[in-house]
């Protein structure tokens, strides 16, 4: 279950005062409804403008993703909002980011936002290969037992959570919430996004044509991509059994459609 969402005024006074040491007086706060993994997600109006603040219990189950995101942020390109400060006090861990206003891109067939998504994933795969010198989990370890390691191993820094909620389209497209990074093959984020397009109404063939605009995916080994689709189905089935949630069913259905499409393209064997 997602963590309980706190309001700014729920924080201990000492924690709020520590944040104001970085920002100046907080003049206004606007809770943000999107996102399931943050105990606190709020836009703060300060004397120098808005800042986005997220965080939660420092020693809770969400503490380590915040630390991970803070550690890798300096290595990420400017398509990712900058981390300005970190506050850890009285059991709370808060991150203060550059505010990136915008809406989530639309992924349905014919959406004009699809070009921006493809362009951003192309740029990230290029700029984050090789992986910056920061410690992140290998994708082969995260998917241990699901797929042969050699098929997804690589030296790209991956985001791995391609929900449209993590993209913000304002004056340009930004990718936020780098709390689950991995190091692996540079085409993996495009493959995750491809499944999101199928969920949004694209046929698997059309979704693959979109993904082929991203060079890292276009150059991926076909056997590796098919094995990825198969592993994604098995992972989705496992998650549905162990931690069912409303969003998992449609994603699993999309992954199954893609896997069937991949198998239909394989040559028949005698």
Image (cartoon, grey):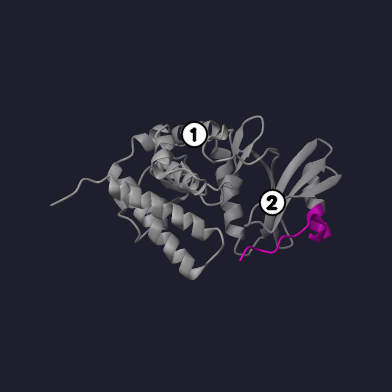
**Where is residue 125, by image quadrant?**
top left
Residue 47 position in % (x across, y down): 84, 37
Instruction: Give the mark nearer the N terminus: 2 vs 1.
Output: 2
Disc 1: which residue: 118
Residue 259 position in % (x across, y down): 35, 52
In this orientation, does residue 30 appear?
A: yes
Nearest the viewer among 69 and 7 is 7
Nearest the viewer among 44 and 215 is 215
Residue in view at x 60 percent, y 39 percent: 105
Residue in view at x 52 percent, y 52 percent: 180
Secondary structure beneath disc 2?
A: strand
Nearest the viewer among 218 and 43 is 218
In this orientation, does residue 26 appear?
A: no
The magenta stretch spans residue 8: yes
Disc sitting over residue 54 in the figure: 2
Disc number lying in front (2 or 1)? 1
**Where is residue 131, by image quadrant?**
top left
Secondary structure beneath disc 1?
A: helix
């Amino acid at each position: 279950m997602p963590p309980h969402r706190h309001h700014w005024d729920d924080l201990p006074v000492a924690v709020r005062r520590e944040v104001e040491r970085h920002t100046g007086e907080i003049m206004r706060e606007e809770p943000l409804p999107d996102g399931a993994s943050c105990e606190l997600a709020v836009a703060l109006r300060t004397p120098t403008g808005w800042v986005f603040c997220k965080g939660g219990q420092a020693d809770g189950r969400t503490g380590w993703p915040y630390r991970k995101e803070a550690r890798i942020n300096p290595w990420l390109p400017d398509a990712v909002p900058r981390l300005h400060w970190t506050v850890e006090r009285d059991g709370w861990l808060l991150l203060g980011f550059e505010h990136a206003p915008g809406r989530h891109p639309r992924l349905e067939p014919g959406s004009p936002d699809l070009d921006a998504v493809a362009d951003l994933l192309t740029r990230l795969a290029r700029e984050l290969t090789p992986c910056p010198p920061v410690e992140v989990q290998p994708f082969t370890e995260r998917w241990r037992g699901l797929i042969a390691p050699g098929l997804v191993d690589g030296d790209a820094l991956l985001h791995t959570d391609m929900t449209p909620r993590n993209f913000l389209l304002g004056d340009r497209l930004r990718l936020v919430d780098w709390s689950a990074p991995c190091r692996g093959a540079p085409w993996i984020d495009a493959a995750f996004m491809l499944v999101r397009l199928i969920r949004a109404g694209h046929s698997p063939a059309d979704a693959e044509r979109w993904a082929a605009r991203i060079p890292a995916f276009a150059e991926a080994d076909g056997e590796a991509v098919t094995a990825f689709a198969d592993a994604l189905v098995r992972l989705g089935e496992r998650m549905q059994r162990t931690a069912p949630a409303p969003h998992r069913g449609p994603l699993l259905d999309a992954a199954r459609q893609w896997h069937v499409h991949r198998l239909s393209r394989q040559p028949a064997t005698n």
